[in-house]
């Protein structure tokens, strides 16, 4: 290993050695509370995004639903307890209890048509 390679490797360690020397110096001067505060802040900077990501994934798994449109049958993804519009047929839909329902204003009676087979009179 040549001197240039050693010097090049040492250039990556220099900031870490400087930081360690500053922490050691502050600790010997009785300013360990400052070092502890900085370590807590750095710990929180790493911990908060991880906890936030896990919490967001948990919330999303509980509230994101995928169901078929009751009018046209297109699969739609939406958040629980929200209103949305079907991108295929344009019907206003309401997400309730992890299912999609047609949105009808209060006082409107929603009727489902049923096809009745025709019978001949001669029977």
Image (cartoon, helix red, strand yellow):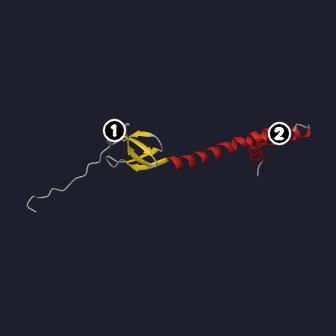
Instruction: Kindly give the residue lying farthest to the left in the view shown.
Output: 122
Residue 47 horizontal side relative to residue 98, left or right:
right
Give the image location of residue 120, x and y in percent.
Answer: 11, 58
Q: Which residue is mark 2?
A: 35
Q: Nearer the viewer, residue 99 or 68?
A: 99
Q: Quadrant of residue 90?
A: top left
Residue 123 horizontal side relative to residue 66, left or right:
left
Please report the residue visible at 75 percent of the width from the left and 42 percent of the height from the top.
11
Residue 108: mark: 1
Pair 2/1: label in front? 1
Of helix, strand and loop, which one carries label 2?
Answer: helix
Q: Nearer the viewer, residue 39 or 119?
A: 119
Alpha carbon of mark 2 to alpha carbon of mark 1: how far? 66 Å
Q: Quadrant of residue 20?
A: top right
Residue 49 at least partly seen: yes
Q: How many marks?
A: 2
Give the image location of residue 79, x and y in percent.
Answer: 48, 43
Quadrant housing the C terminus? bottom left
Give the image location of residue 72, x and y in percent.
Answer: 31, 47
Which of the two labelled residues, at mark 2 and mark 1, occupies the earlier sequence position? 2
Instruction: Kindly give the residue lying farthest to the right in the view shown.
Output: 29
- Mark 1 surroundings within 10 Å by alpha-carbon count, few (fewer than 14), some (14 through 19), many (20 or more): few
Please report the residue visible at 39 percent of the width from the left and 45 percent of the height from the top.
101
Residue 22: mark: none
Give the image location of residue 115, x and y in percent.
Answer: 22, 53
Of helix, strand and loop, which one carries label 1?
Answer: loop
Q: Nearer the viewer, residue 14 or 37?
A: 37
Please report the residue visible at 80 percent of the width from the left and 38 percent of the height from the top.
37
Residue 18 at least partly seen: no
């Amino acid at each position: 290993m040549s001197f240039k390679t050693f010097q090049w490797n040492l250039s990556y360690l220099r900031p870490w050695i400087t930081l360690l020397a500053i922490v050691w110096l502050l600790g010997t001067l009785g300013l360990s509370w400052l070092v502890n505060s900085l370590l807590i802040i750095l710990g929180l900077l790493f911990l908060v995004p991880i906890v936030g990501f896990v919490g967001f994934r948990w919330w999303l798994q509980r509230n994101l639903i995928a169901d078929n449109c009751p009018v046209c049958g297109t699969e739609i993804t939406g958040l629980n307890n929200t209103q949305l519009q079907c991108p295929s047929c344009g019907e206003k839909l309401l997400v309730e209890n992890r299912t999609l329902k047609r949105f009808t204003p209060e006082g409107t009676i929603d009727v489902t048509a049923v096809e009745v087979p025709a019978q001949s009179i001669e029977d």
